[in-house]
Image (tube, rainbow, N blue to C red):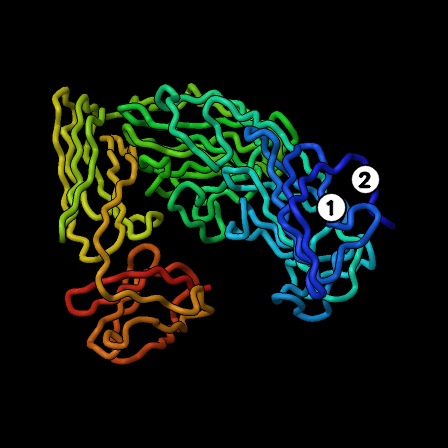
Amino acid sequence: MRKMRNTTLIVLLLSVFYSPFTNLHAQTQITSCNTLFTDNGGDASNYLNNENSEWLICPDDSTQILSLTFTHVDIETAGNEGLDSTGCYDVLNIHDGMDSSAPLIGSFCGEESGTGKSSFIEGHTLHIGDSFKPKNSDGCFFLRFASDQSKNLSGWQADVTCCTPTLDKGMTDGIDVPLHNNNGNYFDLIIDNSCTRNGTLDLFTEFEPSGEFCYTQGLTFENQAFYAFMSNPSGGFVEFAIDSLDSIGIIEMVVFGPVELDSLGNYTGGFINDCVTGKDPWSLFFNAGPNQTYILGVATENPGKTSLETLPATVGLGGVLPVKMLAYSISNNEHTVELSWTTSDEVNNDRYDIYKSLDGKEFNKIGEVKGRNNSNNENDYKFSDTPNTTGDIYYYVSQIDLDGSYTDFSILKASFSKSEIEFTTYPNPSSGGRFSLNMNKEILESEAQMQIFDHVGNQVVNTKINGNSTFDFQDLAAGIYIIKIIAGSSIITNQHVIY
């Protein structure tokens, strides 16, 4: 059955060239939010053999967000690797941007509207109902179609539609996340993620998702919205309550930070403070440091509206803490890290416990500083650590009351320049304790030492390398390990996962 149109296709065809071998079409531009996108055969004909055509599809209004939804797909598949190892003889490439240098969303074929055949290679079949939204700030798609010398089919048809974003009060879709003034730590927002470009954390921060859980992976659903905010001068506990207003299914929430905003509008640093996931999770709870920038992310299984507000009954909300933190910072030189903090109005304050981590997730207590119990004066505190390692190291201070209750202050990061030695382990993750080191040959053949620590900081392996690059520690249980290589005065660590 041939494709049927219900709406006029609006295109600007710049020029068409023909040769005995290739049918070259200059770029076709579509700038309409209510049209159809088809192959060059249109309604009446199939696409051509030896075709090489390009399209640029953009919304007619830069404030709108484009969607491309396929309603007819009949592009020749292959019974082998086909063209460019796609499993297709004829291929439609879709790029997220203005030209072929933009990220490739996918290379597709499929005969669902014809014989029903799929691409020989998994992940390259285009289906009826497949829908795409751009993740670039221009809001455009660049598409290129190439066919071989035989068997032209009826091609494709896709609806080009647009929506107008309804996010308000500083909520954004993750492409551009400006910092907003939200009166400290208080929130009262309506989040409508039914019209977004589906940006992700790694588009505007240095965050790199990994792992299976939201603490290390971030948000997984594509219907996402973000809010960047600065906490008030005192910091304190913040508890978000969220309720669904539409049938949005499972909700994910994550707080990421503290981060720093540069002059270009990009965020650096940060880690996941807390997250929840489930059907209408009732709240997310985290402790904000004073005058720190955080990013709140909300994602839903289905597009729709949710309400988000700060619970007014939260203890410590807006900075009502057992101690008033006036200053809280970290500094480091070549060998030493120093944590400094200044307080006032201490009430029943017993001590401060100091925690440290090499990955920003698993922390161990490394010391404590005695508090002033009850004091109305300003009190200065310091704690020093000599980490003897390189890379990023994370610390936080936990205030302990006389009755044993505690308040955790935000995590701070110290960075030490990496040494000249660098290494990776492979495979990573590995099945069991067998893995290999990939590092400088000179280091492998030296008197370098390898130490392995479990997730709570216990040393489980201490051995010399002595030219070995492959190791088998069968006694190591499944889990996350820190591997430390010591070569002369250089020390470097890496994370390895065993399953």
Q: How many marks?
A: 2
Q: Is residue 453 left or right of residue 163?
A: left
Quadrant of residue 271 within the rendered picture: top left
Instruction: Tell me: residue 464, above or below residue 341.
Output: below
Of residues 259 and 117, the one drawn nearer to the viewer in this rendering: 117
Nearer-N-terminus badge (1/2): 2
Residue 5 has which mark? 2
Of residues 155 and 268, the one drawn nearer to the viewer in this rendering: 155
Of residues 330 and 49, the one drawn nearer to the viewer in this rendering: 49
Quadrant of residue 295 within the rendered picture: top left
Of residues 30 and 155, the one drawn nearer to the viewer in this rendering: 30
- Please tell me which residue is depicted at 55% across the width and 28% down the height of the picture: 63
Counting from the top left corner in percent of width and height, residue 190 is at 53, 23
- Please tell me which residue is depicted at 39% across the width and 72% down the height of the picture: 435
Counting from the top left corner in percent of width and height, residue 442 is at 23, 76
Contact (Cβ within 8 Å) of mark 1 with mark 2: yes
Q: Is residue 398 visible?
A: yes
- Label 1 packing within 10 angstroms: few (<14), some (14-19), many (20+): many
Counting from the top left corner in percent of width and height, residue 194 is at 61, 31
Alpha-carbon distance for marks 1 and 2?
A: 10 Å
Mark 1 secondary-structure assignment:
strand
Q: Amino acid at mark 1?
A: Thr
Q: Is residue 128 visible?
A: no
- Please tell me which residue is depicted at 66% across the width and 32% down the height of the picture: 33
- Label 2 packing within 10 angstroms: few (<14), some (14-19), many (20+): some
Residue 246 has which mark? none
What residue would you read off at disc 1? 38
Q: Amino acid at mark 2?
A: Arg
Counting from the top left corner in percent of width and height, residue 326 is at 20, 26
Quadrant of residue 449 within the rendered picture: bottom left
